[in-house]
Image: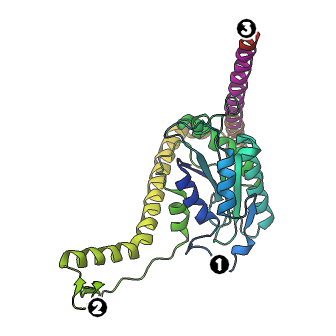
């Protein structure tokens, strides 16, 4: 079974959304999918609670913030379930190297908080980053998470630098998997299916909204229906979220099948050529072809990452020259 390195990001556009996310990460709200007896085993890197985390966030923000700018990026680093079975040391190395990778990408001072969660089924890293442009000091999320190409290159670099050394693969390139909120995605994987909700006659009886000395205000039929609907929706919300993740997995499987068909089509000429090669040499030819393909793919990936870094350096040099000319005038 394939073992994948998983990197997901969520854009947070306001202090309110950052605080809400941190309350979950620091376990300062009810977290049903976490084992409270293991929460003390979590590693808090930097701030130790939401108050300290928000203080670090506010301190890292630039003075001027563009309207609708992404103020914080939340990274989730995990792996496919069971990927590190009986390999705790490799799992620790993977999560710590992932944090170092994020710090190198954004600058250590801009990674305001990080938590390694060990109180859920699959240990994982949550990291909060203020996406400041190193050249301008302004918020510039697009520089880091750009379009589809930039995200694809980021996933490739992460898998190569962080995942490969511990035996994890990159996910399928170009897949059309649906993105869900980090907490919804991970929490849905951890939850068990809820039991059926059974309504009782007492649930259907109008409830007293306001009790007075002589008269009381009770629910009308519309309010009763609304209350029952909300109760049922809240009860089945975990199952709905799990179904969302299941749909995502189904789409991924469909994309994988399509990729397999395309691969089989491309390999057909090679298969025909192999038929003419004696059996005793066929295996060695296949091994050589696979090795060559892997080397070529790795070379292309390395070249893409290196080109991206060179472009970033060249942009920095050009801006430095422009700034120097401006000061010379």
Give the dominant element type of the magenta stretch: helix, strand or loop: helix
Across and down, in percent, residue 95 comes to 73, 57
Which label was assigned to residue 139?
Answer: none
Crowdedness near tag 2: few (<14), some (14–19) or many (≥20) residues, C-alpha within 10 Å: few
Tell me which residue sits at (63%, 34%) in the image. 138
Specify which label sits upstream in the sequence, 3 or 1.
1
Relative vertical location of residue 229 with respect to residue 199 in this rendering, above or below: above
Q: Which residue has dot 3 on it?
A: 329
Span highlighted in magenta in the image:
298-324
Crowdedness near tag 1: few (<14), some (14–19) or many (≥20) residues, C-alpha within 10 Å: some
Relative vertical location of residue 196 with respect to residue 28 in this rendering, above or below: below
Q: Secondary structure at mark 1?
A: loop
Q: Which residue has dot 2 on it?
A: 202
Specify which label sits upstream in the sequence, 2 or 1.
1
Specify whether residue 161 is in view. Answer: no
Crowdedness near tag 3: few (<14), some (14–19) or many (≥20) residues, C-alpha within 10 Å: few
**CB-based contact (under 8 Å), mark 3 and mark 1:** no
Tell me the quadrant of the picture where the N terminus can be found: bottom right
């Amino acid at each position: 079974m394939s073992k994948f390195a998983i990197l997901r990001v969520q854009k947070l556009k306001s202090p309110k959304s950052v605080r809400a996310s941190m309350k979950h990460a620091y376990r300062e709200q009810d977290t049903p999918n976490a084992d409270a007896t293991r929460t003390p085993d979590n590693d808090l890197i930097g701030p130790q609670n939401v108050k300290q985390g928000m203080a670090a966030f506010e301190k890292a923000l630039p003075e001027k913030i563009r309207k609708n700018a992404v103020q914080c990026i939340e990274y989730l680093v995990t792996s496919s379930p069971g990927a590190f079975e009986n390999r705790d040391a490799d799992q620790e190395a993977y999560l710590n190297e992932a944090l170092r990778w994020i710090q190198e990408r954004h600058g250590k001072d801009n990674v305001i908080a990080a938590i390694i969660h060990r109180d859920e089924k699959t240990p994982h890293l949550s990291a909060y980053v203020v996406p400041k442009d190193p050249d301008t000091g302004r918020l510039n999320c697009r520089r880091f998470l750009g379009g589809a190409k930039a995200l694809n290159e980021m996933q490739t670099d992460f898998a190569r630098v962080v995942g490969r050394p511990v035996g994890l693969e990159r996910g399928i390139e170009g897949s059309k998997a649906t993105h869900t909120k980090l907490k919804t995605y991970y929490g849905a994987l951890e939850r068990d299916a809820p039991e059926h909700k059974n309504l009782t006659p007492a649930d259907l009886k109008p409830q007293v909204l306001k009790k007075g000395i002589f008269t009381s205000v009770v629910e009308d039929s519309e309010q009763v229906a609304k209350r029952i609907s909300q109760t049922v929706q809240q009860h089945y919300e975990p199952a709905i979220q799990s179904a969302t993740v299941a749909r995502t997995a189904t789409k991924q499987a469909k994309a994988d099948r399509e990729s397999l068909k395309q691969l089989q089509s491309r390999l057909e000429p090679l298969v025909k050529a192999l038929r003419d090669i004696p059996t005793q040499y066929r295996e060695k030819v296949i091994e050589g072809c696979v090795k060559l393909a892997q080397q070529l793919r790795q070379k292309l990936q390395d070249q893409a990452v290196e080109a991206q870094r060179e472009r970033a350096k060249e942009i920095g040099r050009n801006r430095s020259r422009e700034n120097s000319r401006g000061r010379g005038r």
